[in-house]
């Protein structure tokens, strides 16, 4: 049986998909920004010589890296409110789960990057009278930025794709809107194909620009 493609349902409802795109970008931007900040803090715990800081940081990273993101999303929406005593909105639960998951991966990226710097540079900065914090911000992190860029780019791309799982919480991002239109008009092939193309258009430019930046930095070195 020959299938007849019909994209009229997509063009007629493209404004709905665009609303989903806006929320997808919002989820990605907030979760990635917060994940970077929290990941840096967790990485300092991983590198700490104090067990009461290092072991909780290790446990945090292992829990969020070794459990499915889907389970984390569902847990924060359905189970966490029992502990909190307050029901989270779907968007809040999604941002919380995605942020914590992303921060665990970012923490490992920061840890590996910081550990790649020779110990002598820390000692030289200390000899110049710099505090540990000043040494980290002025000496260490500027050097490891280029080394961590590919890993952070991969993490950002992965997060952009993982935001689609927020649709299970009825977060009205693009995947949710696509599923809703598919069930309404019974044209899943056309609608979900367009959704996949939208994800590609959103993600590929960042990947391409990152590759260009990596090559430029490598050329400067």
Image: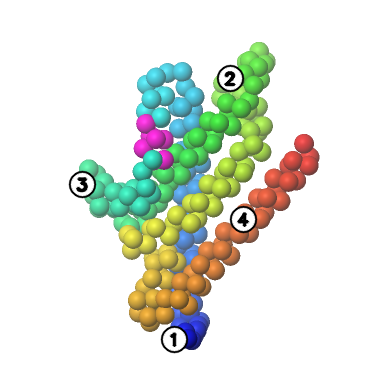
Q: Is residue 194 above or below residue 3?
A: above
The numbered mark, 4 or 3, whose residue comes first in the sequence reads 3
- The percent position of residue 95, horizontal first and vertical second, equals 40, 51
The numbered mark, 3 or 1, whose residue comes first in the sequence reads 1
- The percent position of residue 211, horizontal first and vertical second, equals 68, 50
Spatial CA distance of label 4 from label 3 is 39 Å
User: What residue would you read off at disc 2?
Assistant: 131
Q: Which part of the image, by quadrant, shows the N terminus?
A: bottom left
Q: Residues within 10 Å of mark 2 (few under 14, many from 20)?
A: few
User: What residue would you read off at disc 1?
Assistant: 1
- Residue beneath the point at 42% across and 66% down: 175
Spatial CA distance of label 3 from label 1 is 51 Å
Residue 60 inside the magenta-drawn segment: yes
Q: Is residue 70 left or right of residue 37?
A: left
Would you say the magenta stretch is mainly helix, strand or loop? Answer: helix
- Residue beneath the point at 44% across and 56% down: 163
User: What residue would you read off at disc 3?
Assistant: 82
Q: Is residue 94 above or below residue 38?
A: below
**Bounds of the magenta span?**
59-65
Q: Secondary structure at mark 2?
A: loop
The numbered mark, 4 or 1, whose residue comes first in the sequence reads 1
Eye-nearest disc, 3 or 2 = 3
User: What residue would you read off at disc 4?
Assistant: 206
Any part of residue 42 in sight: yes
How did the renderer colour the structure? rainbow
Q: Is residue 8 above or below residue 141?
A: below
- The percent position of residue 217, horizontal first and vertical second, equals 73, 42
């Amino acid at each position: 049986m020959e299938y007849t493609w019909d994209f009229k349902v997509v063009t007629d409802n493209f404004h709905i998909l665009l609303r989903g795109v806006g929320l997808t970008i919002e989820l990605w931007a907030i979760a990635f920004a917060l994940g970077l900040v929290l990941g840096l803090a967790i990485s300092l715990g991983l590198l700490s010589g104090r067990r009461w800081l290092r072991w909780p940081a290790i446990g945090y990273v292992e829990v969020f890296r070794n459990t499915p993101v889907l389970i984390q999303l569902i847990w924060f929406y359905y189970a966490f409110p029992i502990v909190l005593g307050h029901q989270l909105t779907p968007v809040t639960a999604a941002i919380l789960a995605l942020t914590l998951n992303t921060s665990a991966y970012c923490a490992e990226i920061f840890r590996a990057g910081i550990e790649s710097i020779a110990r002598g540079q820390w000692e030289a900065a200390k000899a110049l009278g710099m505090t540990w914090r000043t040494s980290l911000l002025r000496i260490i992190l500027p050097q490891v930025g280029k080394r961590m860029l590919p890993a952070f780019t991969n993490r950002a791309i992965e997060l952009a794709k993982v935001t689609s799982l927020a649709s299970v919480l009825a977060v009205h991002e693009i995947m949710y809107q696509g599923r809703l239109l598919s069930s309404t008009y019974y044209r899943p092939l056309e609608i979900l194909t367009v959704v996949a193309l939208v994800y590609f258009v959103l993600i590929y430019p960042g990947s391409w620009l990152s590759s260009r930046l990596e090559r430029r930095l490598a050329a400067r070195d």
